[in-house]
Amino acid sequence: MSRIRSEKRVDVKVGFSCNNRCLFCVQGRKRYDIGDFTTKEIQKKLEESRKIADSIVFTGGEITIRKDFIELVRFAKGLDFRIIQIQTNGRMFAYKKFCEDAIRAGANEFSPALHGHTAALHDFLTRSRGSFEQTVAAIKNLKSLNQYVLTNSVITKSNFRHLPELASLLVRLGVDQYQFAFVHPVGTALEYFERVVPRMKMIEPYVKKGLDIGIKAGRRVMTEAIPYCIMKGYEDYIAEKIIPVTTIYDADFVVENYTEFRLKEGKSKGPECRKCRYFRVCEGPWREYPERYGFGEFIPVRK
Ligand code: SF4
């Protein structure tokens, strides 16, 4: 099954508490410095969101560890959102009853994160023992309940050589869609830059092999934050081409158009990029990458 959307989507952050401590977390210290929003604050964001979108993604932090999780999903359902997606580390969905309750409340898409094909690798990256076992159990539970499951895996120095094995595992688990996202070097990932950020040229063959496995199995596969010049031959799988217009309700600000934000502030292109046939459509890498490693790997694709 594949879902291609063109509708407006809103990402609502519920706060920053989480039961994982990922080495590459983009939220950094926000769990300590900002914490979580109240039920009322989130409900207000949901009401505002409904005026501009019919698709909602709950993000964080980790929404499933909140006491009001089911209440918030039910509230979104009451507002008649067509898609209610839960972005999650997946651990709580290891409990089948928890999955059933979420589905009954109105959640209809689940986006758990799996970053390694073994417990040793995934748990090393999440810095949470037992997280692999729970996230894998979660995917199995959700698929057994016929839910749409789209996973996200962050590409880091530790796991990029194992992306093909991870892809095979995801296919075996029956996920509908998986995405490999290049680590965004902000927050904790910036703090541990040397440990977590791999070189683009090194990850390329593994990313492509990982995509091939899903393509062959008929799954929807995507990459995020890897420019076209690295993804030659796989341009159709670049997520930025199809990410719907997204508004993000963050901690104390609203990003009205995330695509525009990525282009203006998040990503950057080098002086040579103007010569590239993809200059107009390419967003370039996250700007922190060339700030450290330069633009040498990004060779313009001839027009
Ligand atoms: S515009 Fe720059 S970063 Fe993007 S594909 Fe072309 S050379 Fe690569």
Image (tube, grey):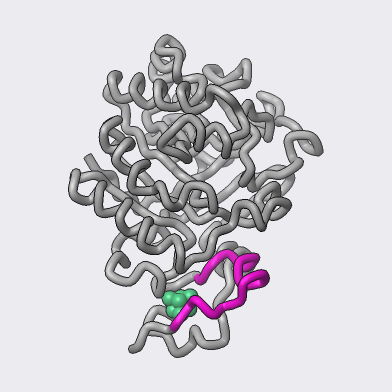
Residue at image point 45% right, 20% down: 93
Counting from the top left corner in percent of width and height, residue 265 is at 64, 67
Residue 16: image quadrant is top right
Residue 207 vs 265, above or below: the answer is: above
Residue 7 vs 72, above or below: the answer is: below
Residue 29: image quadrant is top right
Residue span colored magenta: 284-299
Q: Is residue 288 magenta?
A: yes
Counting from the top left corner in percent of width and height, residue 181 is at 47, 52
Residue at image point 47% right, 40% down: 115
Residue 278 vs 15, above or below: the answer is: below
Residue at image point 62% right, 38% down: 22
Picture quarter with the N terminus = top left
Comparing 170 with 65, the one in front is: 170
Picture quarter with the C terminus = bottom left
Residue 195 visible in this rendered orientation of the protein: yes
